[in-house]
């Protein structure tokens, strides 16, 4: 599948229970850019997680003009506190970002995310 849309934005690389309790967002924003020559109507952004440490996010539909970036913000990811609290070791999960037109996936990207145990800290590079 050739991606008609590219994604960019700010994603947190590590998540733990304390970050969820303090409302640290997984995504600050996502920018979708239409790489095709035609306008894409009613495109939705969908974000899903493996393992399912958060609920699936789906945005309102937007129209994307060729080569014109559109920012989707805020992205309110609802994390499952019970799951994050139950972790006793770090695990690597994935985040799948999709652009949908109707039920058709027109672009998709997968990124890794580290899920830390409730008593692990991400270090001073992220949150001193």
Image (cartoon, grey):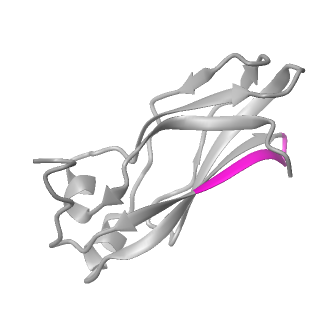
Q: What x and y, as percent, mark residue 30?
A: 53, 34
> Which is nearer the eye, 2 or 17?
2
User: Which residues are drawn in magenta?
Assistant: 102-110
Tell me which residue sits at (84%, 47%) in the image. 103
Q: Identify which residue is drawn at 44% across, 47% down.
A: 77
The percent position of residue 54, horizontal first and vertical second, equals 46, 60
Please identify the dominant SS of the magenta region. strand
Q: Residue furthest bottom?
A: 88
Residue 106 forms part of the magenta stretch: yes
Q: Would residue 113 appear left or right of 3 to someone viewing this image? A: left
Horizontally, residue 6 falls left or right of residue 105, namely left
Q: Which residue is outermost to the front? A: 125
Image spot of residue 16 (x, y percent) = 27, 63
For the residue pair 4 and 57, the one nearer the viewer reads as: 4
x 77%, y 42%: residue: 100
Measured as percent of width and height from the top left, residue 97 is found at 62, 49
Q: Nearer the viewer, residue 30 or 81?
A: 30
């Amino acid at each position: 599948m050739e991606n008609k849309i590219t994604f960019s934005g700010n994603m947190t690389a590590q998540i733990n229970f304390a970050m969820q309790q303090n409302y640290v967002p997984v995504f600050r924003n996502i920018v979708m850019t239409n790489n095709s020559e035609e306008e894409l109507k009613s495109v939705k952004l969908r974000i899903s997680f493996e393992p399912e440490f958060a609920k699936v996010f789906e945005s309102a539909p937007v129209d994307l003009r060729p080569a014109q970036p559109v920012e989707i913000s805020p992205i309110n990811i609802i994390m499952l506190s019970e799951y994050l609290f139950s972790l006793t070791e770090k695990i690597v999960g994935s985040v799948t970002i999709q652009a949908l037109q109707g039920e058709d996936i027109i672009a998709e990207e997968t990124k890794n995310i580290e899920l830390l145990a409730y008593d692990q800290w991400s270090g001073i590079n992220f949150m001193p």
